[in-house]
Image (cartoon, helix red, strand yellow):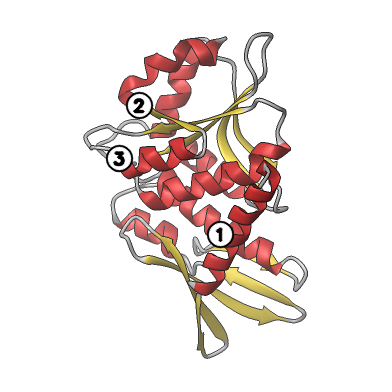
Amino acid sequence: MNDMQELQELIDNYYTWLKDKTVWKDINDWSEITTPYLDRHNDYIQIYLKKEGDDYILTDDGYTINDLEQEGCNLNSDRRKSLLTLALNGFGVQKDAEDALLVRASPRDFSLKKHNLIQAILAVNDLFYLARPHIINLFFDDVRDWLEEEDIRYSERVSFMGHSGYSRLFDFLIPKSRVMPERIIKLINRPDRTNADSLVMAWLDTKDERPVGSKAYAFVNDNDRTVPSEVKDALQRYEIKPVLWSERTAVREELAA
């Protein structure tokens, strides 16, 4: 089996798993969709669907942001609002006046919009996972500040179209240089299997659409916690280099080159 066939088989298996593990339930005019993705409480992420004319509304009913705020994560600062907007824009997701995350979908692009909403929920959960009042910086800010301190060129919050046709959001892009290929960085603030698997699928779907030789890195937040070996193993198996935040200096030279 060649690389392209293997990639297509992995993606096909992934979407078969998504279909088999997704449960639908009708609630009055809405349908509740329980997905196989886990949130930071290890509960299955649920979204809601309603037909409106010829199109559909898909929403989290405000759960994602309200849950973060109940845990003490205030999203009212300009910096956090900016990061939230960037995360949502990367997936084409809106936030309404009641803090619900939502997309509008036609029958033609329903699968894509549903996928984007779920990925946006995961991204927001992970981005603000430790953003409680007594913590000064977000992990995103820490990584960005370090890149700047080390004089490493980058673009932030970049989206690429994957082989599947789905948009994939990454946190930082370091452009190709004379001696190094393009380098793509995704942050894992909450190091668990769900986030590792999500990154693996994003990279598998993206890598053949990027310039030859592009490399992927996962910056893993290991502040005050042990990163499970299964997280690192899953990333390495698919040629994503895990970089523990406490060991970031080990990759300084290859990122700065």
Hey, what amino acid is under mark 3?
Ser
**Quick check: 39 above or below 87?**
below
Given contact means CB atoms under 8 Å apart, are the residues at marks 1 and 2 in contact? no
Q: Which residue is drawn at 50% across and 44% down?
A: 199
Residue 17: where, in percent of width, then height? 52, 66
Hey, what amino acid is under mark 2?
Trp
The crowd level at tag 1 (other Cα within 10 Å; few <14, some 14-19, many 20+) is few
Residue 253: where, in percent of width, then height? 48, 10
- Which mark, by number, is residue 245? 2
* Residue labelled with disc 3: 229
At mark 1, the secondary structure is: helix
**Quick check: 173 above or below 97?**
above
At mark 2, the secondary structure is: helix
Residue 41: where, in percent of width, then height? 30, 59
Q: Nearer the viewer, residue 12 or 132?
A: 12
* Residue labelled with disc 1: 14
In the rendered structure, the answer to whether residue 73 lies left or right of residue 91 reads: left
Quarter holding the C terminus? top right
Residue 109 figure quarter: bottom right
**Quick check: 202 above or below 11?**
above
- Counting residues from the start of the chain, the first of labels 1 and 2 encountered is 1
Residue farthest toward the bottom in the current orientation of the protein: 28
At mark 3, the secondary structure is: helix
